[in-house]
Image (tube, grey):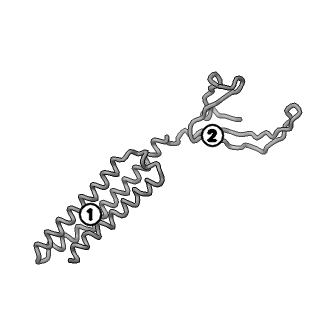
Amino acid sequence: MVVGQVDRGASIAGLSEYPGEAEILFPPLSNLEVIGDPEMDRRGDDLVMVVKIKVNANNKGLTIDQLQERRKSLHMDLCANVLREVERDLTPSVLSAERGDDGAEAGLLGDTVSKVLNECRSVLADHKERDASWYAEDGKYKQAIVEAVDLSVCAKCKVQMVTAE
């Protein structure tokens, strides 16, 4: 096995359960790269295939905690975009109703939009409070994305129901 100065692992031979064996710990996300063609070698009476390998330690790789935080951060960015989209799409309907003759309709629509936006903010606050490890599970991450996307659709539907009456 070929190791460079950066790729060198930590020897724990002194802690090994197996006397005479060298155990080496490598950083997470390290990999073994085959360098060259396999060769046949005679070891005593046995013929053994020897494969030369090189360790590549990924020192710039993120830790699991950092990867989980990144996943949560990406989701929260999606949520912020959904909220901005809802605000952008619902505000013009309130403004156009205010320009109309019916003040009661404008008031009802304004109240509805305000409540819908508060509901959206509340759902997104719940998403923000979740621990980053929650987003590490694919099923839960998918659930969170579906909730965020559905939030936009539901918000627009609620306002359309009020304007259709």
- Is 50 drawn above or below residue 159 in the view shown? above
Tell me the residue at 41%/45% (across/down).
132
The x and y percentages for residue 96 are 18, 74
Q: Which disc, if any, is residue 144? A: none
| Residue labelled with disc 2 | 56
The x and y percentages for residue 129 are 33, 47
Tell me the residue at 29%/64% (across/down).
86
Classify 10 Å Cα crowding around label 1: few (below 14), some (14-19), many (20 and above). Answer: some
Q: Which of 150 and 5 is in front in this view?
A: 150
| Residue labelled with disc 1 | 87
Element carrying mark 1? helix
Q: Earlier in the sequence, mark 2 or mark 1?
A: 2
> For the C terminus, which image quadrant?
bottom left
Residue 100 falls in image quadrant: bottom left
Quick one: which residue is furthest to the right in this view?
Answer: 45
> For the N terminus, which image quadrant?
top right
